[in-house]
Amino acid sequence: MKRSVLVFAVLLILSGQAGAQFKLKLNDSNSRLKDSVGTVSGSSNISKTAGLPSYIVAGIIFFFINPELVFENKKVYFGLTKEVSAGLYPFGRFAFEYTHVFRNFGSNQFRFSYNYDFFIETDKFFAYMLSAGVGYFTDNQNNGFFPQASVGMVIPVPIGIATGVYPYFKARHTFVKGQGNSNITDFSFGIGLMLYY
């Protein structure tokens, strides 16, 4: 549990302190000197702060890793998860997800699922996406099956082969096979790329 709190605190600090730690002073001349605090000296008084806003940094972090709360056997654990999925609209999509739960047992979890997506168009620049799915779970010792549901919004942003990004919230309940094993309920938040065609 201490590791979970530590990882959460580090992610919170990183998203809040994403601004630049130094300022650049730009000038027109060719002679520029760099001092010990990372400023470039010159005759101009123009300054510009380098770096990205904290909400963009948080978005980038949530794109690559997603925080997850895991409820199992009346205990709460913190985890990091990432799902990769591909599909053909309107037939649904198949997904693979890896989760690392910060605890001493069953910390590596793998899930394979089929999800069907429902889009609700709006008169805004985005659409809502509701997903329902079922899948298979394993942690290399136990296995089971789960239903899951998620809600999010699709923002059309053509990035390479992607047609948009979608922030989402997902809830899932895993029925773990075997006597003495407890079921798992988890909630996660993340951002993904939409590759539907």
Image (spheres, rainbow, N blue to C red):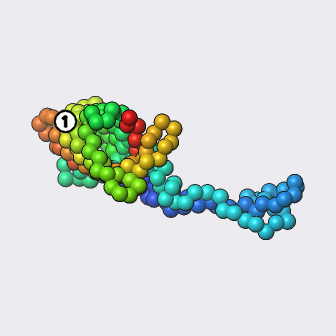
Residue 118 in the image: above or below residue 18: above
**Residue 131 screen position, x and y as percent:** 26, 44
Residue 118 in the image: above or below residue 74:
above
Identify the residue shown where x is 52% and y is 60%: 54
Q: Which of 176 and 49 is in front in this view?
A: 49
Residue tagged by mark 1?
Answer: 145
In depth, the one of 137 and 132 nearer the eye is 132
Residue occupying the point 45% across, 59% down: 12
Query: Percent position (x, y) of residue 158?
Result: 49, 43
Residue at 48%, 36% in the rendered image: 161
Amino acid type assigned to the residue bearing label 1 in the image:
Phe
| Percent position of residue 88, x then y | 33, 32
- Residue occupying the point 35% across, 57% down: 123
Closest to the observer, 12 or 151: 151
Vertical relation: 10 (above or below) 162: below
Specify the farthest residue to the top: 140
* Residue 54 visible to an observer of this rendering: yes
- Secondary structure of the residue carrying tag 1 is strand
Quadrant of residue 192 in the image?
top left
